[in-house]
Image (tube, rainbow, N blue to C red):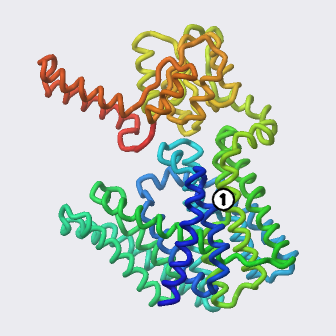
Amino acid sequence: MTELITALAVLFVTAGAFLLVANHFSLSPVPFYILAGLVAGTFLDQPELIELAQWGIAFLVFVFGFTVDFKSLQAVIRDSEAAAVTQLIIVAPVAFAVATIYGFDTLNAVYFSVAATLSSTIVGAGLLEHEIRDNLVHGRLASSVHFFDDLLAIGLILVLSAEAYTTTQVTSKIGFGVLFLIAALLVYRHIFPLLVRLAGDSDELVMMGSISILIGFLAGAELAGLSMVVGAFAAGISIRSDDASTIGVLNGIESIKDFFVAIFFVTVGALVSVPDLEVFIVAATLTALVLFVNPFVIMLSFVYEGYDARTAFLASSTLNQVSELSLVIAIQAALAGAISETLFEAIILAAAITMILTSVARRHEETVYSTFVEGLFAGRLTRKIDERSDVDEGLEDHVVIIGYGRQGRRVVETCERLGREYVVIENDPVLWDDMRAECRNYVLGDAMSSYPWEKAHVEDATLVMSTVDHRPVSKSVLEVDTPAEVILRASTSEVARDLLSGGAGYVSVPNILASDQLATVVQSTLDGDRSLDQIREEHLDQFETLERYGFGSRVGDD
């Protein structure tokens, strides 16, 4: 116990020093956590580091399970199925063949393939936090692939944790895993709601009950001979995250999550050792597969599904790091003596390299796209846009609307009520059928590319209205050569001022508009212009309209 506390102290003191540097220069903390680990690793022994890494990953998997939204599961699988399956059937066999060429036996080749194929939810979701929260298309796609990868990894952990790869052993592990899943669903359905009712309004009691459920599942996993990660995942999905009563739990878990994120990344860096030539070659090969082959295959799959090249690239560019669950599998194999020391060190080194490079490369995505990717799909992109767009040739004096989410539909309704022509530009194929059925003119394409604007006849438009709260999109709209007035959207007044200075005629800031709307309602009520019953009926009509279009229960869908 003393050794563990000492290890934690060394890790956090070192991480704190490096984090000060990252904070001073406003840089991503991930590379600095790993660099701190490289320093701290010189003072710590591997057994303590492996134990810390397992606990860190277990809690993060618990958080992943907690955030699984069963209501949106069907849509998530629909978005990711083709790309994730393509990734699995192409990248995994290629990686397996490469490992075999390097002389690894079948089991070690499987470990190599897993590391090359699965991507990190912690890194990817962290980089796309804003995009996922705002339900942008590439954020949703990347998140759905992460979800598929994590479920696959949990299954692999069950199979690969068998002491001997006999039918009995493997079946036993899978059977225990299924029992844990059933138990988790029973707790989710019956026990956790009872806990919430008994706790009343006390977030502290609900939080303590949630942690107790986690400890119970971890103890069960230990008794069943399963990885603690399996128990943590089951505990996560047993706690409801789709209810207002769990907001306190969510806030508490998010606070603890930062602690374990730091442990995870610092221990990854600390586990890195100075590689010999063989380890370096294997790690370099694994890094190349993860950084280039894996995201390229996923990008092609998304393009084939109908997504534009930019969206496909942005989604795949955050799927190019070794998964934390691949590290769990490697660590379990190392503890059981089932993985070669060369491969174990190579996986750890490749994980550290890919996690650092992904965080750094995030700042240069647009340059990489315009330099290397855009030209590959130029002809195909215009053909796809032509096939999936419908715009009258003689259109002029019209409104160009960016985005066909909640606000976009309201703007379309307004244009139709006023008898004004319009064109909708949207890059989400999921909304294509809705646009075909509901819009007079539409373009299915990326507003950050030039061709969709040509297709929308923006040179003859009188107004361009963007409903997308994403600064790069807003900047691209301002760069379009058009005499039309421009209305944009922003999340903060600071961004709004910047966009107004850049040429926007008006910028919608939802928080400010909500305050203005509330003030108008209060004034109308006090002045007697409208009764609260009238306001209530109008409000109910608005909510019914949102539910009819499928937006009433979707957070962050614009």
When the figure is inspected, residue 400 is found, relative to residue 427, above or below; the finding is above
Q: Is residue 513 visible?
A: yes
Residue appearing at x 81%, y 67% in the figure: 284
Decide if residue 388 is on the left or right side of residue 430: right
Image coordinates for residue 401, horizontal then vertical, percent:
53, 23
Whether residue 148 is visible here, answered yes or no, is no
> At label 1, which amino acid type do we have?
Val
Identified at 28% across, 72% down, the residue is: 191
Image quarter of residue 275: bottom right
Q: Quadrant of residue 554?
A: top left
Observer-nearest residue: 125 or 114? Answer: 125
Q: Is residue 148 above or below residue 413?
A: below
Number of numbered discs: 1
Task: Judge whether 393 appears above or below 185 on screen.
Answer: above
Q: Residues within 10 Å of mark 1 (few under 14, many from 20)?
A: some
Closest to the observer, 40 or 457: 40
Mark 1 lies on a secondary structure that is: helix
**Is residue 220 rendered to the left or right of residue 117?**
left
Q: Position of residue 47 (x, y in %)?
A: 60, 87
* Figure quadrant of the C terminus: top left
Location of residue 193 in the rendering, given as x and y in whole percent from the top left corner? 26, 66
Which image quadrant for residue 425? top right
Location of residue 550 in the rendering, given as x and y in whole percent from the top left corner:
40, 39
Residue receiving disc 1: 85
Q: Residue at 75% across / 61% down in the picture? A: 90
Q: Residue at x 76, y 85 (%)?
A: 340
Q: Is residue 40 left or right of residue 521?
A: right
